[in-house]
Amino acid sequence: MKDKVKKPFYKRIWVWVIVLLLIIGVGSSQGKSTGSSSSSSSSSSTAKAASANSTTSKVKVISNTAVTTDLTTGSDYVVGKDIKAGTYDITTDSGSGNVMSKDGRLNIILSAPADANSDLSLTSYHAILKDGETIEIDSIPSVHFQASTSPTAISNGNLNAGDYVVGQDIAPGRYTLALVAGSGNVQTNDYNVNEIFNSDSSAGGVSSTTVTLHTGEVLSFDVQTISLTKK
């Protein structure tokens, strides 16, 4: 009987080395796959969180920095210097005249209650004053700017002439807006609403309108008082 020929020892070692390298390679590949999956899951979670935060930030209540101030007849009153920016209820105790901003955003005839003698004059106005605006007061001895308190968004009730933010002053939704006193324009900043309110239909206006108000819109009107009724 012939003796079996034994394979050299170093050849057996190389076989085991190759097997070991293959095992390590497979393990490393699985690790990378798991890491990639975890990274993808983490990125997806982050994206979802960012999306949620973006949705929440759309409804943002702006804090009111207004400070109650009285201004006399004059021009070139700068918001941020002579009066703080913010939301105010504007009134006067005597006389009648104009209160205007140079950019035309504010342009009203303001009267003391005793001197209000037409539908065109207002006894109060809810105004949003912005930094850098310039205010002019004409023919009124003194105008009182009362800092407005932080409101709870209303869905039913009366509002005096002014600018109102939907989502902050008025709850978003579908409403009937109706004339209570005075006459004038009723509109939103995007012209979703654009009406003339007048109790005399022959004068070309209407006494009510049904509209949908969306968060972020600003409802402005120079009608003395209107009512809101949510549908």
Image: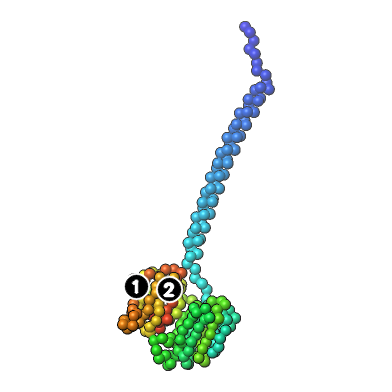
Write the residue at 60% across / 81% down: 81
Residue found farthest to the left:
202
> Can residue 29 be seen here?
yes
Q: Answer left or right for 15 relative to 44.
A: right
**Would you name the residue on which mark 1 appears?**
210
Quadrant of residue 207 within the rendered picture: bottom left
Residue sitting farthest toward the top: 1
Q: In front: 83, or 105?
A: 105
Which sits earlier in the primary sequence, circle 2 or circle 1? 2
Q: Position of residue 139 (x, y in %)?
A: 50, 91
Q: Residue at x 45, y 89 (%)?
A: 111
Q: How many marks?
A: 2
Kindly identify the residue that appears in the image at 40 percent across and 77 percent down: 186
| Percent coordinates x, y for residue 165 in the rendering | 46, 73
Give the Cα separation between the discs numbered 2 and 1. Answer: 13 Å
Q: Which element carries disc 2, helix, strand or loop?
A: strand
Horizontal and vertical percent position of residue 217: 44, 71
* Location of residue 48 in the rendering, given as x and y in whole percent from the top left corner: 50, 55
Disc 2: which residue: 188
What residue is at 63 percent from the left and 26 percent from the top?
16
Looking at the picture, does residue 181 appear above or below residue 13?
A: below
Q: Nearer the viewer, residue 47 or 79?
A: 79
Dot 2 amino acid type? Thr
Q: Quadrant of residue 132?
A: bottom right
Q: Which mark is residue 17?
A: none
Name the secondary structure under disc 1: strand
Residue type pointed to by label 1: Thr
